[in-house]
Amino acid sequence: MMRIGKPLAHPSPNHGPRRGVSAPDCVILHYTDMLCPEAALARLCDPAAEVSAHHLIAEDGRIWSLVPETERAWHAGLSCWGGERDMNSRSVGIELANPGHGNGHAPFPAPQMRALEELLREILARWSIPPERVLAHSDIAPHRKQDPGPRFDWRALALHGLSVWPEAAEPRGAGEILADPGEILPFAALFGYDFAGCGRESGGDLGRDGRSPSDLGAHGTQARISEILRAVRLRFRPQSPCEALDSPADARDLAILEELARRWPCAS
């Protein structure tokens, strides 16, 4: 297959050695939240910005390779998945040029998606990464991120074996509100979502507000449930209207998370 966008080397100084692991075991997808790919490229290579990714894909399928995949790029920030807190050390980061939520959640054009699919196929093969370890930035940092957002076609990636997609039958009373929204938590945790929230990037057991999970109380628990629900709905219920992202947990949310946990439990 001819590559849609042959990678162009554009080295970024913003990287360092991986910590505690010798190779990546997941891929994290982002959008740039900027108006053009050239502006994103400049920022990802600006030492003062202290951000980077391994690859950047433009809307027309052009790919820039910024950081060697053997190195630790700076794209995940305060994040967590399956109990792992230094996601920069564990991942390959891919930025997709897209204006983001501030400009109406623009769709991802076909050339960009084809380039992503080819690049992902190579990365997963190169590092023996399973498709369930292709994650959204909103998965690993649900308290503060929503990219790549509701217009990204996760199901298409799954159909190509490059991600996962739940195909749970419509549950009885699909729109029925759960009497106990905490029902979702064991399944969310088994799939990989971090209920406790994100602590310091390098480790630790504190929530992002500096308290341990046991000190969060009922209000903190509900906040964590809401964060996880938003992440699940952004990725697995993208047809939902924006206002539904913050609605109470329902039977469909539970069915999705039950299937994700059963079929793809996090191995970390």
Image (cartoon, rainbow, N blue to C red):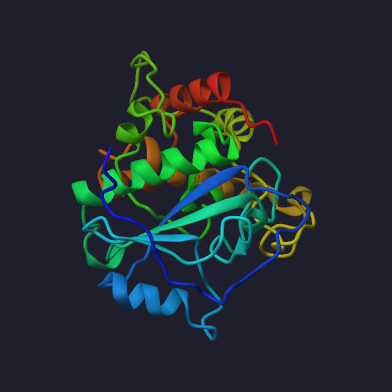
The answer to whether residue 85 of the structure is visible from this angle is yes
Residue at x 35%, y 47% (from the top left corner) = 116
Is any part of residue 151 visible from this angle?
no
Q: Quadrant of residue 43?
A: bottom left
- Residue 185 against residue 72 in the figure, above or below: above
Q: How many marks?
A: 0
Q: Nearer the viewer, residue 30 or 122?
A: 122
Q: Nearer the viewer, residue 196 or 140?
A: 140
Q: For the point 57% across and 55% down, which residue is it?
A: 69
**Vertical order, 267 against 75 (above or below):** above
Image quarter hosting the C terminus? top right
Q: Residue 144: where, in percent of width, then height?
A: 50, 61
Q: Residue at x 35, y 38 (%)?
A: 154
Seen in the picture, residue 164 relative to 14 is either above or below; the reply is: above
Please, which residue is most extreme toward the front here?
Answer: 2
158 displayed left or right of 207: left
User: Residue 207, image x and y in percent?
Assistant: 70, 57
Residue 205, picture quadrant = bottom right
Q: Position of residue 58 (x, y in %)?
A: 28, 61
**Which quarter of the rendered picture does the N terminus lie within?**
top left
